[in-house]
Image: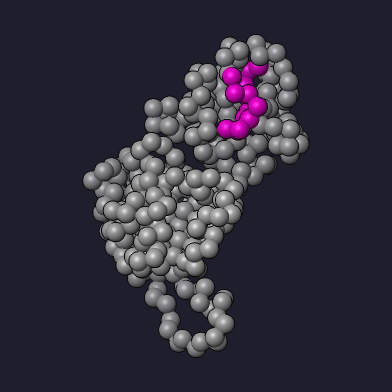
Amino acid sequence: MTLTVLFAAGDAAFADYEAPLTRALSEAGLDARLVTEAAPEDVDYIVTAPNGWVQDFTPYTNTKAVQTLWAGVEGIVGNDTLTQPLARMVDDEGLTQGMVEWVTGHVLRHHLGMDAHIVNPDHAWDHQAPPLAAERTVTILGLGTLGTACARMLATVGFDMRGWSRTEKSVEDVACHHGDAGFGTALDGADIVVLLLPDTAATRNVLDAAAIGRLARGAVVINPGRGPLIDDDALLAALDEGQLSHATLDVFRTEPLPQDHPFWAHPRVTVTPHIASETRTDSAAREVAANIARCERGETLKGLVDRDRGY
């Protein structure tokens, strides 16, 4: 029987995904038709995004699973009408590689002090070599797919790597901490902290004044995860006081970041417009098709969302 896959992530996204996703479904051995309209009772799978046009999932009584194209699901996981299994994008190789490149680039930028040489209007000749990576402690908060990939890459550069996660994890060459007891230990004395946690009730404002105070004096904060992970007021106060030397932020509570937000004008804040990583069409299409094939074989969906945890 031919499967009906409803693409509900919007017309603009469909223009990009129609050909690669149709091809990926076929290459996965699936007899499937990809559509943007269908009678709800005929839909076997829904491919969407948190801002997709299907917001009431109640009529889709025969739908086996909903696959989102995004890694973050905070915009959809609380939808009470969504009772079908929900899977998030976790193994898109393009998304992962993009995040690894962005995080590695900005960690190295701050580690090497590149800004002082890129913008040097006084032509200062400050002959001070940076420390080696092994002398710099980098902590990654969040050891999911993205956090683990970034930690591994930074470990190969030679940084003294730490990681923290809600549950126990093990990553080679990374000192892994978990739970409430391990949170402070992961932060204590860290020179650079990278936030790659999901946005949940338990993680909002996880980097508050107390957490920032545990970092090394003059530490750097890098946030490509989610805007609400940081207490903005505490961050600005720490930058002004000198506890932090810089913050590079890619995500914000309100996006686009309002023009009058103090982050724009602060001399020790770098704003990037939510570009740390994007779902790449071809690789994401392969992951969507592979997950549908898993479900058809009776296997557990990859990236299956735990509603209680929120991700």
Outermost residue toward the left in this view: 181
Residue at left offset 72%, top offset 17%: 38
Quick one: quadrant of the N terminus? top right
For the residue pair 33 and 60, the one nearer the viewer reads as 60
Percent from the top left, x then y, of residue 72?
Answer: 51, 38
Percent from the top left, x then y, of residue 287?
Answer: 60, 36
Question: Magenta region's main secondary structure?
Answer: loop
Residue 187 is drawn in which quadrant?
bottom left
Q: Vertical placement of 295 versus 257: above or below?
A: above
Residue at left offset 39%, top offset 50%: 231
State yes or no: residue 49 in magenta: yes
Percent from the top left, x then y, of residue 116?
Answer: 50, 77
Quick one: quadrant of the C terminus? top left
For the residue pair 241 and 115, the one nearer the viewer reads as 241
Q: Give the range drawn in magenta.
A: 43-56
Residue at left offset 32%, top offset 54%: 209
State yes or no: residue 202 in magenta: no
- Relative side of 6 to 57, left or right: right
Residue at left offset 39%, top offset 42%: 204
For the residue pair 293 and 207, the one nearer the viewer reads as 207
- Relative side of 201 to 251, left or right: left
Residue 19 is drawn in which quadrant?
top right
- Asked if residue 307 can be seen in this view, the reply is yes
